[in-house]
Amino acid sequence: MKIFARKYLLPVILSGLYISSAGQSFLSLDSAIAITLKKNYNILIAKNNYQVAENNHAPGMAGMLPNVSVLAGVALNDNNIDQNYSSGTTISKDGVTSSTLTPGIGLTWTLFDGTRMFIAYNQLGLLRDEGLAAEKMAMEDNVASVIDAYYNIVQQKQLLAVIDSNLALYKEEMDLAEKQYQIGTGSKLNFLQAKVGYNAELSAEMKQQVNVSTAIVALNQVLDEPIDKTYTVSDDITTGKELIYDTLKRNMATLNPNLIMANTNISVAHNALKEVDALRMPSVALNLNYGLSRSEYSAGFTLLNQSLGLTGGFTLSWTLFNGFITNINHKNAELAELNAKFQYDMLEEQTGGALLEAYQQYLINVKILQLDEENFKVAKENVEVAIEQFRIGTSNIVQLQQAQISFSQAGTQVVSDRYTTKVSETQLLQLSGQLIK
């Protein structure tokens, strides 16, 4: 009896019995996460969007740098002219040609625009921060899906291990019943009943094998891998991280990407308000031009006119009245900033509520897991006693099969508890912004 228990019962659940397949490569959870971070389209799009925002966060994009351009123009004319000068000279000629060449380099630089350029630069930095938060959000969403799908495979394989262990019990029971029937110490009814139980468990094993395959397909879909790809996975569902509510709540406020983005939106709205107010200020620009102006004429008083040098000056513009549009935009910007604050407060309240609810459920799941693990030990001992009593003829087949059912249910419940606890743990880490560090 002790040999049987050590061979079939002890590996189940408590040690996370793992059914491996020869010839298949091993896929760790870290490797699965690395695949989704590298291949997932949502993550790739978020990364590219962040890179665009990072590229845009430059002084030139905010209008802080000068604009330098090269200009060149050529004008050709063919005219009939009639010119009368005060000296009494008269020129009248047809087909007079002239050409004008104006190459040059020009610089325009806004020196002051009511600090709008500095506000714009800060705004571009905030948009970059939003892009980073959006990237983390996409990564955490997909990593959470990978963790759930990965450990679902482990769960389904452990459920298969439970069935296999129970199948071994039914086989032992059937062999005992057959031997007792053959030597005349047991009835044929016991043997047939044991065989029915064995066949039913064999059918359950086949169905569970399908569940394992389905779980692998589901993970392949999450990873954007070929759906027919197969591999082995970890042999246990790792749980037991010490999660403390106060720490989770504190991290949520600073690390949750949704809250980070909502808080950044407040700053974006405030910058928009400052930008509207900056429109009330004057704008000063520096204009410089260094170039050549050369004109040639085939007739007339001036045959050549050429100038080469630097010209420059300042431009001042100041909108004194625009139909109260600036005032209206200011009020609208204030309302937009207020709405951004409302949205952050609402999201903080919702996320905090979700965190508290998830944490309470997590604590219950941990306690249930501990209770069911103890119950499994009792069920294991119960079935060991039942099969030994059936062996010596002090119990009947009904009592033994009831013990087997209890053992199977207890094992199945422990596996389910471990997966549920892992899902709760993942949810808490995601809400607190700690799923990806």
Image (spheres, rainbow, N blue to C red):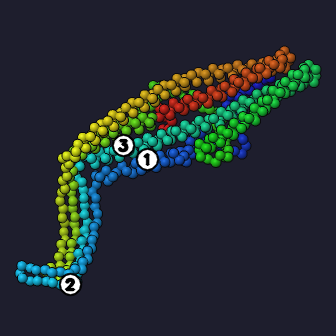
Q: Nearer the viewer, residue 156 or 218?
A: 218
Looking at the picture, does residue 421 appear above or below residue 137?
A: above
Residue 309, horizontal then vertical, whole percent: 19, 69
Query: As drawn, is 367 to the left or to the right of 308?
Result: right
Determine the secondary structure under disc 3.
helix
Q: Which mark is residue 94?
A: 2
Residue at 28% over, 67% down: 71
Q: Nearer the viewer, mark 3 or mark 2?
A: 2
Dot 1 corresponds to which residue? Answer: 50
Label 1 with label 3: CB-CB less than 8 Å: no
Residue at left offset 25%, top offset 66%? 105
Q: Secondary structure at mark 1?
A: helix
Of callouts 1 and 2, the N-terminal one: 1
Image x and y of residue 7, in percent: 76, 29
Instruction: Tell me the SS state at disc 2.
Output: strand
Residue appearing at x 24%, y 71% in the figure: 102
The kind of residue on which mark 2 rests is Asp
Residue designated by label 3: 126
- Which label lies toward us, 1 or 2? 2
Work out whether residue 6 can be spotted. no
Q: What amino acid is labelled 1 in the image?
A: Tyr
User: Mark 3: few, some, or many residues within 10 Å (few <14, many ≥20)?
Assistant: many
* In the foreground, 392 or 258: 258
Badge 1 crowding class, 10 Å Cα cut-off, few under 14, some 14 to 19, many 20 or more, is: many
Q: Quadrant of residue 364?
A: top right
